[in-house]
Amino acid sequence: MTRLFCIVIFFGILAACQRHREPPSPPPPASRIVTVPLRKASGPPVRTLLGQVAYDPAASAQVMARLPALSVVSIRVFPGDRVSRGETLMVLKSPDFLSAESELSSILDKPGAKGRGRVAGIRVLAEQKLRLLGASRREIERLERTRRPVDRYEVRSPLTGTLIRVGPAEGAQVRKGDLLFEVSDLSRLWVQAFLYPGEERGFRRGTPVSILPLHEGGTAGSGRILRIAPFIDPRTRTIPLRISLDNAGGRFRPDSWVRIRIPVEGRKSGPVFLVPERAVVRTKEGKTALFIVRGGRGPALVPVTVLGHQGGDAEIRGDLGESDRVVTEGILPLLSRAGL
């Protein structure tokens, strides 16, 4: 009897649970697709790239120690300071420099040192040795006048520019070949950029370009394409692009990022359109495309080439018509449906 009573109670509770079950939640609403018309771009096509400002090696110099030194006696300038060609930037204490001056001093005391004989030839060689070590004409004239060799080795700037880096600190020992300092003329810079294979078509060496800082309110600079590399960088799988930058006004700084606008030549395969940047998608193969609505049909994926950027718009070219509309919202479900 007790067992029968328990069974009845169990089925009663089960029926009550079935009566109070929560209603199923409604299905999520379908994603909303928003489209906008294509806009035809005015003017010639311009390709926009990101680039990084770098030092121009032809306008830079690294000064190495030409002989060992016991210590750095003084450093007269510091990174960021403006220096002139021939200006003394560092003084070293070097027994080797003292030996070279002593050699010339001993030759100057010999008869015929200023004539045309053998002694005079040895004197010329001793002077050339001091010059190779970095001695100035003024130091050699001082030695000729006083006959007092010194162990102070003055290191001078080879060009006018900005001191970029200093190697040793004051009091440090220096070995032959150590970096002492680096100077660069910042009025001449490079911009390094990269192109994906196939994007180099329409670019030519010597083409003038506009260079703009990424921050708002910056004024544009001018430059020219110096070199389009004939190889692909194995690390990035891109083609390096080198651009000269006229930085006479000092508006750009090395290692900063800039935007490069390059006019594209020889591309007459159709009009250029403007679309919102958010509408451009990239496929698994790394190619760019758009979802286009055409003739009342559903969204279709169309490959396009991105030529550049204007504000928040992308300049594109492809198999497009002026009556087409581009999808700007609801792209993620379309990508998932297309397996991208």
Image: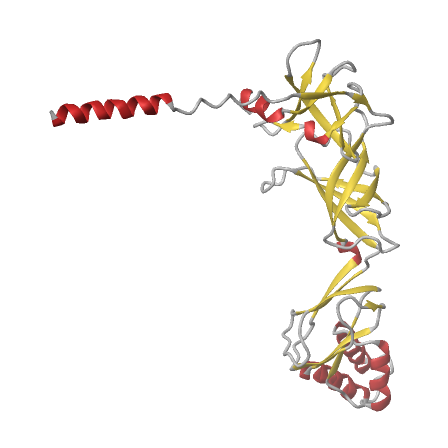
**Quarter of the view holding residue 40:** top right
Where is the C terminus found, in terms of image quarters? top right
Q: Relative to the observer, which residue lies in front, 156 or 254?
A: 254
The location of residue 142, given as percent across then percent down, is: 85, 85
Residue lying farthest to the left in this orientation: 1
Q: Which residue is pictured at 69% across the width and 72% down the height? A: 65
Q: How is the image coloured?
A: secondary structure
Where is the N terminus found, in terms of image quarters? top left
Q: How many marks?
A: 0
Q: Which residue is pictured at 86% across the width and 47% down the height? A: 219
The location of residue 278, given as percent across then percent down, is: 69, 30
Q: Which residue is pictured at 24% across the width and 22% down the height? A: 11
The location of residue 78, given as percent across then percent down, is: 76, 71
Q: Relative to the observer, which residue lies in front, 224 or 128?
A: 224
Q: Is residue 335 above or below residue 321?
A: below
Q: Is residue 321 above or below residue 332?
A: above
Left or right, 85 with respect to 69, comes to right
Left or right, 53 with respect to 28, comes to right
Q: Which residue is pictured at 65% across the width and 77% down the height? A: 68
**Quarter of the view holding residue 317:** top right
The location of residue 238, given as percent across then percent down, is: 64, 37
